Image (cartoon, rainbow, N blue to C red):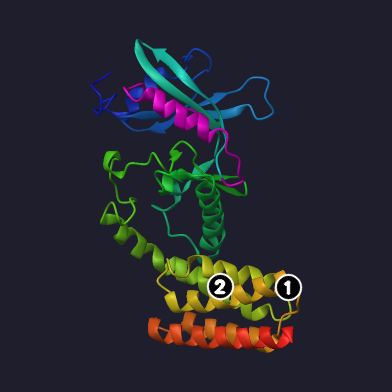
Amino acid sequence: MSVRGQPVMSNPEEWKKWEGRVDGKFPLRQWLGGSEQSAVFLTERTGQPDPKVVIKLIVAEQDADRQLAHWRAAAQLSHPHLMRIYEAGRCRLDGTPLLYLVMEYAEEDLSQILPQRPLAPAEVTELLPALLDSLSYLHGKGFVHGRIKPSNVHAMGDELKLSADRIVSSAELNPKTQRRDVYDAPETAAKAQAAMEAAMPAMRAAILQYVDDMERAAGDSAKLFEAAHEIRGFAETAGMITTGRIAEVLCRYMDDLTRFNKPLDATIVALHVSAIARAARAEDDSVRTGQAVAAELAALVARRLSEGEQ
């Protein structure tokens, strides 16, 4: 073991020497990988319906109690797109004090896929809503995810899940104490901007797929509602600000009609869908034009709603 903040193992594979050992409660089966600061092993929960799980080991440093508190708080969260935490605690191997975290087992993560090939638009379309939904859930509970990056996005059968071991209370997140890498948010690391720009083509392709779905959804309010809200959700992140603002107006219109239990006006819907499609397929995103179009459509919606109340 080393002093605080320095590597525990000079080489990540040194953790592999503990394969076959028992941390005091869980057997360390196959070494799955890790870094100088942590390691992940396959393990098992005897007598449980899902016995195949993984255990993560990290060195117990001065902030060990706080780390355990973070993990145990995250274990209380439940969402279909968050990895489940089963147990966290302390152990000792060869005199080294460690913390352990037992979690769901995932077959693969994005860091294993992206070096081989970029994601297809359909894969991005499937991925982003799941991640945004899980992050929205965390933020609503007063938590944030401290490290969004490919290795923390896991595939479990047909499900996509975000790792839960880096979840902390939003009040405790301190960017100054975090290790920096290319996946840091733009406000904490300039490299993340380059990563976001590299992801934009796939995100834009996913939005265009939603636009196609919206155009084919004429008369199907459920599909239209879903497509419009997905476009609104991450168009701005993809740099398609005009598209997102027009989609926002349509979403508000549909939300208002749902709240008042009124039918959709086919003319208003068609105007919005046409404007969203034109904005999404334009080579340049004109924010000023988008604001003007969105304002005109919002005024039209307001007039129609007012007429309906008379």
Q: Amino acid at mark 2?
A: Gln
Depth check: give the residue in front, 173 or 57: 173
Where is residue 104 drawn, in percent x and y? 56, 34
**Disc 1/disc 2 C-alpha distance (Å):** 30 Å
The residue at the point 75 percent across, 77 percent down is: 262
Q: Which residue is identified by label 2?
A: 209
Q: Position of residue 192 (x, y in %)?
A: 31, 56
Is 199 covered by the magenta stretch? Answer: no
| Quarter of the rendering occupied by the N terminus | top left
- Taking the image as shown, residue 270 lies to the left or right of residue 34, namely right
Residue 110 position (above or below residue 35): below
The span picked out in magenta is: 55-81
Query: Is label 2 in a helix, a strand or a loop?
Result: helix
- Residue 76 highlighted magenta (yes or no): yes
Q: Quadrant of the C terminus?
A: bottom right
Which residue in the structure is indicated by mark 1?
Answer: 260
Would residue 56 be visible to someone looking at this image? no
Image point (50%, 85%), residue name: 295
User: Nearer the viewer's eye, disc 1 or disc 2?
Assistant: 1
Which quadrant holds residue 45?
A: top right
- Looking at the picture, which amino acid does disc 1 mark? Phe
Residue 291 x, y percent position in the rendering: 44, 83
